[in-house]
Amino acid sequence: MKHKSAEPWDPAYATEKLKAKVCDQLEILWTRHVKERMDERDLQMGDVLHILKNGFVYDDAEESTQKGQYKYTMECPTPNSGGRIVKVVVIPSSAN
């Protein structure tokens, strides 16, 4: 039997774990891709942080291109998106 904390996580557990990682010391890698997509969609960093604090993972994880890492999609409406549902793809690391 797989240990619950071993990835990939089911959606409910992923939501719990990802929200738990959101704290004052959270380190986010803001890639060029992320910044470009945020500009295209007229989103702010605060929108991403809002999703990480308040969003939910509804779908199963997808394997990342990096072996042993998984992608989770969190989603929820954000204050600056005019009520749109916004999704953020998260690849958690063992560090914060």
Image (cartoon, helix red, strand yellow):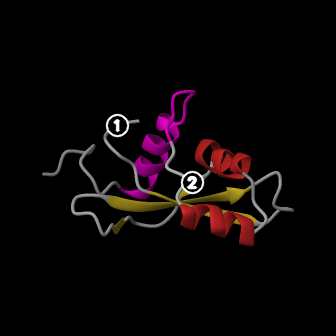
Near mark 2 (Cα within 10 A), the count class, few <14, some 14-19 or many ≥20, is many
Q: Indicate left or right for 29 with 66 as reference.
A: right
Q: Is residue 48 above or below residue 96?
A: below
Residue position marked by numbered label 2 in the rendering: 56
Confirm whether the magenta stretch covers residue 56: no
Residue type, numbered disc 2: Phe
Q: Residue furthest right?
A: 82
x, y (%) of residue 31? 52, 58
x, y (%) of residue 56? 57, 54
Residue at the (38%, 64%) spot, across then down: 61
Q: Residue furthest front?
A: 32
The disc, 1 or 2, on the residue closer to the chain's N-terminal end is 2
Residue type, numbered disc 1: Ala
Residue at the (51%, 45%) spot, across then down: 28
Task: Give the image quarter of residue 60.
Answer: bottom left
Task: Label 1: state its secondary structure.
Answer: loop
What is the CA distance from the residue labelled 1 to the residue labelled 2? 21 Å
Magenta residues: mostly which secondary structure? helix
Residue position marked by numbered label 1 in the rendering: 95
Residue at the (47%, 67%) spot, across then down: 59
x, y (%) of residue 67? 22, 63
Q: Which residues are magenta?
A: 10-27
x, y (%) of residue 1? 12, 51
Residue at the (34%, 60%) spot, across then down: 70
